[in-house]
Amino acid sequence: MATRVLITDDALFMRTMLKNILLHNGYEVVGEAANGRESVELYQTLRPDVVTMDITMPEMDGIAAVKEIRKKDPSAKIIMCTAMGQKSMVLEAVAAGAKDFLVKPFKPEKVLEAVQKLAN
């Protein structure tokens, strides 16, 4: 069965880019969220295997969303997506429970490597 992924990013083009990379490599994209609050709600409904989570978003940022999701499901597998130069935020996200991180702009091989690592 294909690994089920929830994509969270406030930028539609970033969600589309990730979705295309994942779909073309046999993953199932079960949902897309434009902010952390949506991601928390969708996580509870969809129960994806892996979540990609942007750090900087309106309403609820990625770090707060990671904390909320992990509160409800301590085994949640979340990959943070960050722009260059956000190292302190990545460390905070990992401390909050993120399992890995990706740097934008996305390199398809890095996306696949991170999702594959958590899918197992």
Image (cartoon, rainbow, N blue to C red):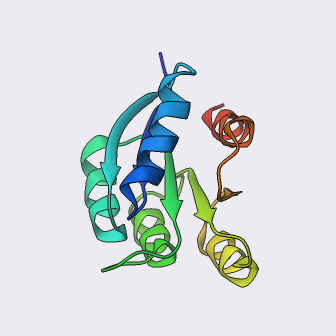
What x and y, as percent, mark residue 25? 58, 21
Residue at the (32%, 42%) spot, across then down: 31
- Which quarter of the picture shows residue 92? bottom right
Residue at the (68%, 73%) spot, across then down: 90
- The answer to whether residue 49 is seen in the rendering is no
Residue at the (74%, 78%) spot, across then down: 85
Say how many tags the image has.
0
Q: Nearer the viewer, residue 100 or 111?
A: 111
- Which quarter of the picture shows residue 98? bottom right
* Relative to 36, residue 14 above or below: above
- The answer to whether residue 39 is seen in the rendering is yes
Is 55 left or right of 6, judged from the image as shown? right
Is 92 left or right of 69, judged from the image as shown? right
Report the residue that reaches farthest toward the top: 1
Is 61 left or right of 77, judged from the image as shown? left
* Relative to 92, residue 55 above or below: above
What x and y, as percent, mark residue 105? 65, 55
Q: Nearer the viewer, residue 111 or 77?
A: 111
Q: Nearer the viewer, residue 69 or 82?
A: 82
Report the quarter where the C terminus lies.
Answer: top right
What x and y, as percent, mark residue 97? 61, 67
* Relative to 62, residue 81 above or below: above
* Relative to 31, residue 69 above or below: below
Is 85 left or right of 67, judged from the image as shown? right
What x and y, as percent, mark residue 65? 42, 71
